Image (cartoon, rainbow, N blue to C red):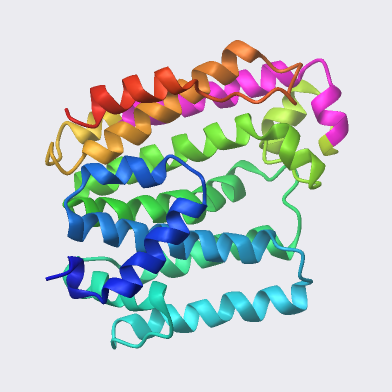
Amino acid sequence: MTPLGAAQADLDAVTALVRAAGTSFYRGMRVLPPDRRHAMYAIYAFCRIVDDIADGDDDLARKLPALDAWHARVAGLWQGASDGPVTRVLARAVAVFPLREADFHAVIDGMRMDCEAAIVAPDTATLDLYCDRVAVAVGRLSVRAFGDASPAADEVAHGLGRALQLTNILRDLHEDAARGRLYLPRELLDAAGVPHDPHAALAHPALAEVCAQLARRAHGYYADAAAAMCRCDRRAMRPARLMGATYQAILARVERRGWRDLATPAKLPKWQKLWIALRYGVA
């Protein structure tokens, strides 16, 4: 029997989409049993597709209907409706695991926030809503696919999702500015006298102060997630520990690089990725 009882061709198509993304996600999820692994691949594929819609070159008149179509596809999953490999595997995943429809819709709404207008210096409440939609909602789906649907697992998603997204924001400042985006919260920018214009902000001498404060928030969320993991099923949290350790290492590398040469990538060397995988992937 195939994982999730899905057609092998559909599983292969979804797996190929994940591998083509070129991230460490494909290897990281291999610590999971086949049913859970392929559910996670389908969740990732869904997230990738809607993210590509939001970040694509189409104008808003095309993007919004494309995202709305995914709202409709998600609603149909609980009736077994599907129209391609990703939705067919997702339909099997939602039949097997306690995935929540609202979390899929939240992810789409987060992508809508990104494509309706460039996000520039959002207030803290808006940034937190954005993080909840594009990262924490994915975490809530993920912990259920991992094998823990407890309130503590949702706390893991709450902390780890925010920590990962803040790490991404700090890592990608230069790339985001090139797209006219600046996700640093306006309260921190205003307190430090940093302008809201993305390029001016990145050149301002007080940028380091703002980034250091946001990094401290991220560290706090990592700590919250780690504490919540102690109250979860240990085996189910293996992928969460792996992701947390990987992104904490990325944040540490970003902090060591500093906030001046932002065009320099803050990537982990292969040896460090392997060490993290060996330590946390089998723990």
Hey, which residue is sitting farthest top in the picture? Answer: 256
Using residue 191 as the reference point, say whether residue 29 is left or right of it.
left
Using residue 10 as the reference point, say whether residue 53 is left or right of it.
right
Residue at image coords 38%, 85%: 82
Q: Is residue 179 placed above or below 254 in the rendered structure?
A: below
Using residue 8 as the reference point, say whether residue 56 is left or right of it.
right
Q: Quadrant of residue 203?
A: top right
Asked whether residue 65 appears in the rendered view, the answer is: yes
Q: Is residue 267 placed above or below 187 in the rendered structure?
A: above
Quick one: 112 or 281, which is closer to the camera? 281
Q: Is residue 249 placed above or below 173 in the rendered structure?
A: above
Q: Percent position (x, y) of residue 189?
A: 74, 29
Magenta stretch: includes residue 212: yes
Q: Which residues are magenta?
A: 199-225
Residue at image coords 43%, 60%: 16
Q: Percent position (x, y) of residue 46?
A: 45, 65
Asked whether residue 196 appears in the rendered view, the answer is: no
Q: Percent position (x, y) of residue 59?
A: 79, 71
